[in-house]
Amino acid sequence: MHAITIPEPGGPDALQWTEVPDPVPGEGEVLVEVVASGVNRADLMQRQGHYPPPPGAPEYPGLECSGRIVELGPGVSGWTVGDEVCALLAGGGYAGKVAVPAGQLLPVPEGVDLVTAAGLPEVTATVWSNVFMIAHLRPGETLLVHGGSSGIGTMAIQLAKAAGARVAVTAGSAEKLAACRELGADVLINYREQDFVEEVRAATDGAGADVILDIVGAKYLDRNVDALAVNGRLAIIGLQGGAKAELNLVKLLGKSGAVTATGLRGRSLAQKAAIVAAVREHVWPLIGSGRVRAIVDRTLPMREAAEAHRWIESSGHVGKVLLTV
């Protein structure tokens, strides 16, 4: 098969479409013939040499894919050859085939085409695990989403609205904020022109956000604590603004607040399987009914992965960027 390899870390042109050996499914795995793969910021970090795959994971980038099962490994039940699926991966999605633990497979939701399904596993698993399983967003609460027009952001808006929450978002342009409004966002904040702490307080009568989903990290840590409501929960899922910052514990204690930081890639198979099962139970019916949908910015051939990475780095996208084999 062919896969996107990274002979040397670097810029987008470091990505090479190369012939490589086919993977073999191990115990509890299935072999999926890839139709499409989602592009995530973590892929860009891996390309730059900053985010190596965990031990035992495929060396190729790609944290989610869609395709068809072509082989079952030992000990797999509940799936058959020919099933159309999408999957959460530890790596390997930028390839013609990938071996996937069966617990990380999802059926393609009703009403969703096979290519579009590639953009669902990572965003749904990230949002559901952080906003609902960890931060326990409840109806009537306010969620602040940084990067509301990103793949994660567009899914977070929809799932929070479906749960009966109020949603505030930050984004860097009027066009991106308009896209967030169309998805249901209630409070629109241009982070280039407005102070999100002040805007969130104004929109909540001074109370603040009950849950904050943050992709920025260090740069926003202190201000995120300022923006939290009493008993608020800050969920950090990205480090686009740096990895190290001081946390003012006096402010956090004063709000009885909580700060969590999680990723998906390095979690155990059992943890990932539990998250995927929860997504199938709670999110898949919303997608099947049309209440929640995948937002796809553009689709490019896998051979043009470098161009996809350039587009993500430019932050010009709204929703997901997909690669097709």
Image (cartoon, rainbow, N blue to C red):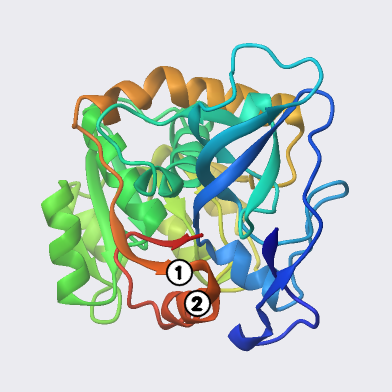
Camera sees residue 186: no
Q: Position of residue 298 (x, y in %)?
A: 32, 66
Locate the N terminus by quadrant.
bottom right
Residue sticking out furthest to the right: 55
Where is residue 11, by image quadrant?
bottom right
Distance in Å between CA atoms under marks 1 and 2: 5 Å
Kind of element beneath mark 2: helix
Residue 260 in sight here: yes
Q: Amino acid at mark 2?
A: Glu
Q: Which mark is residue 301?
A: 1
Q: In which quadrant of the rendered view does residue 29 lie?
A: top right
Q: Is residue 131 above or below residue 214?
A: above
Question: How far across and how far down the image is residue 240, in percent?
Answer: 55, 71
The answer to whether marks 1 and 2 mark residues whose Cβ atoms lie closer than 8 Å is: yes
- In the rendered view, does 196 fall on the left or right side of 226? left
Q: Which mark is residue 304?
A: 2
Q: Residue at x 52, y 67 (%)?
A: 302
The quadrant where residue 149 appears: bottom left
